[in-house]
Amino acid sequence: MTAPRFADVLIPVAVDRPYSYRIPAGMELGPGDVVAVPLGNRTTLGAVWALRDEPGGVSHNRLKEVAARFDVPVVPHAVRQLCDWLADYTLSPRGMVLRMALRDPDDLAPPKPRVGLRVTGTAPGRMTPARGRLLAVLADGLARAKGEAAREAGVSASVVDGLVDEGVLEAVLMPAEALARLDPDHAVAALNDAQHAAALALCDAVAARAFAVQLLDGVTGSGKTEVYLEGVAEALRQGRQVLILVPEIALTTQFLDRFAARFGHRPAAWHSGVGTTKRGRVWAGVAAGEVQVVIGARSALFLPFQDLGLVVVDEEHEGAYKQDDGVHYHARDMAVVRARLEDIPVVLASATPSVESRVNADRGRYRRLVLPERFGGRDMPKIATVDLRSAGPPRTRWIAPALEAEIRRTVEAGEQALLFLNRRGYAPLTLCRTCGERIQCPNCSAWLVDHRFRRRLMCHHCGFNMPPLEHCPKCDAVDSFVACGPGVERLAEECATLFPEARLLVLSSDMAGGIERIRQEIEAVARGEADIVIGTQLVAKGHNFPNLALVGVIDADLGLSNADPRAGERTFQLLQQVVGRAGRAKDGSRALIQTHQPEHPIIQAIVRGDREGFYEVEIAMREAAMLPPFGRLAALVVSAEALGDAQAYARTLVRAVPPTPEVKVLGPAEAPLALVRGRHRVRLLARSPRAFDLSGWMRRWLSSVEAPRGNVRLEIDVDPQSFL
Ligand SMILES: Nc1ncnc2c1ncn2[C@@H]1O[C@H](COP(=O)(O)OP(=O)(O)OP(=O)(O)O)[C@@H](O)[C@H]1O
Ligand SMILES: [Zn+2]
């Protein structure tokens, strides 16, 4: 057999098809190899998608040659299949999907050899206390990195340099740092019966080495983490790798510590906050099979695991798993796809499973593992509503008397209260008292949010910001602005007035100091170093605050009012999660929910702790309306600098809709967010039954229409989560 002479190479740009190249004599290529190929007048990176004896389509002589093959990990078979699958399903150019699965070979260079210092035996000419401390640290004769030695001895780097100059210390090469091995039996947790049963089922699934989806459905604080860590342990015993996806990886220090307590070491982390060098090492380690467990954000789905044995998706209901720019994909769903391609089990864990996952479990496609009670028999918080229509706070205040009394009681008892308000900044709207003008973003159909800590008015959609105004732009009145509605900063102001003695902490994703500061503050809350915590949805997610006894929801109606078909589900999940932060270590916890509609079925389901009731009603509603998972949806957003251009292209699309009884195309309609970043947005929505190949149909439809021209853009979102 002769070696194939042509290679189809996929390039990580917005193209859907691989290009054919000639393989130069002497070069051996395999599928997934990372190569350099000429493209136009430059050389670009690509991955070998297929090998052939005949070129695909183009005549032989015009074909260019593959320029080089890089000695880096290949894109594994399962990842190539995942790219193909994801591109087909989401109607994204395959090259853009590959982009998420490729690393620049420069970032994968083996780590530089480490240089250490050790004593030579020569005595220093002059002794100082600092030199003495340094030599004492190095007295064992072992080499240490310069910074490490200086830190351990508490001396400056110049002290070290001085001794090197005198020949007292010498530089030596140190062996590469070996990766710590995780020990599946390092500290096995004692599980309760429900945990034990669920863990056994997981371990069996891992041992079976076959595709299966487990929905780990356990109330908040039931100990889901301990359960899936047993699945991780089983995969480690089998010598296989594990991927754990989390929605907000930067805030998972608590999890990393728990993991280390269970297995002896932390897992490798993969997210945008990890530096390029470190990422390159994780990538290479994953490909070599040396990195055993990765905890990562959604992009970790594309890592080149050599022998993946289990995927865990924690907080599977989280909206953060949906990527809403570039390639629109849902990392939970793609985790299931990857598990199927690898033929391994996947665990979806949540206290509030998505309706999709719950329906899959009810239909028997997923196996449901239930933890019905909190670990240690802890009570769920006692939940009550505050009817804002009759028992609300005085004007321009947001904390009703009943909630105020509860907060006082809590703080006086030395426990923590958490006030939840899903609105960043001071006030969502600034209004001119004289003429009624509302201050809007110049680029978006959105109000500017008053951020007093930063002294800026900011747009939450495009990032536009400006200093607070003195004159009204419309009527020129001076000092005429009033802040309307509450944000977390304003709530903090109210708390400071009501509870001047209490230690207040505001947790919001836009705080100065970024993610690192938020991480520290979350740890401080967990240690009990705040009496009243005021937070956005950031605080609702998976944290363990042992001293937290009261949760107050300032405005439960926020998510209920809009026309988004997922609003009900999202509100239920968010409220259930935030209420579930209370009483995790002690009984007697409470939650108060302020609402204008205490009779609303979702609020009622929360108050009564009636999860099953919620799912029953929500599932019936989705089925009646043919909404996911009973029907399929795909959103198309046409945007342009001029509204007319966007509308014209949207109408062109509608005219070309192939007549198909299964599919209904709704729109065009102005998007709820009609203007973003200076672009006008018009939406279409395609809906089909579940059993219909909507992606394939869309591809046929769109290929019959001319691509948008000029500044008109078309964005496609299959299975949309957001309806803005
Ligand atoms: N078997 C166990 N032994 C000791 N402690 C446990 C065990 N299981 C759970 N816990 C403790 O119970 C608490 C809740 O567990 P965990 O955080 O895993 O719950 P969860 O189900 O993930 O909750 P949530 O969905 O609210 O995030 C934690 O403090 C955890 O350490
Ligand atoms: Zn804006």
Image (cartoon, helix red, strand yellow):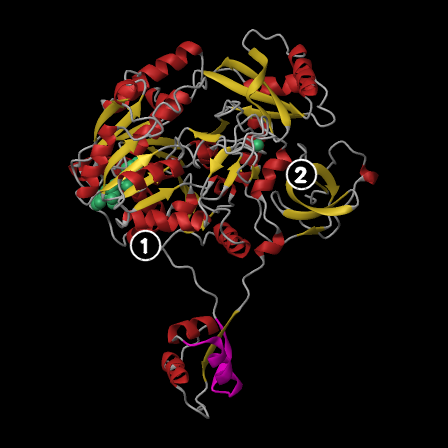
Q: Earlier in the sequence, mark 2 or mark 1?
A: 2
Answer yes or no: disc 1 within 8 Å of ligand 1: no
Residue 585 visible in this rendered orientation of the protein? no
**According to the image, label 2 marks what residue?**
13
**According to the image, label 1 marks what residue?**
183
Amino acid residing under circle 1 = Asp
Residue lying furthest right in this view?
A: 61
x%, y% of residue 676? Answer: 59, 28
Q: Residue at x 46, y 93 (%)?
A: 125
x%, y% of residue 8? Answer: 69, 38
- What residue range appears in magenta? 155-174
How many marks overall? 2
Vertical side of 160 occupied by 373: above or below? above
Towards the viewer: 298 or 482: 482
x%, y% of residue 10? Answer: 66, 39
Q: Residue at x 39, y 45 (%)?
A: 251
Towards the viewer: 94 or 448: 448
Amino acid residing under circle 2 = Val
Q: Residue at x 41, y 37 (%)?
A: 344
Q: Residue 157 magenta-drawn? A: yes
Vertical side of 15 occupied by 143: above or below? below
Instruction: For mark 2, give the secondary structure.
Output: loop
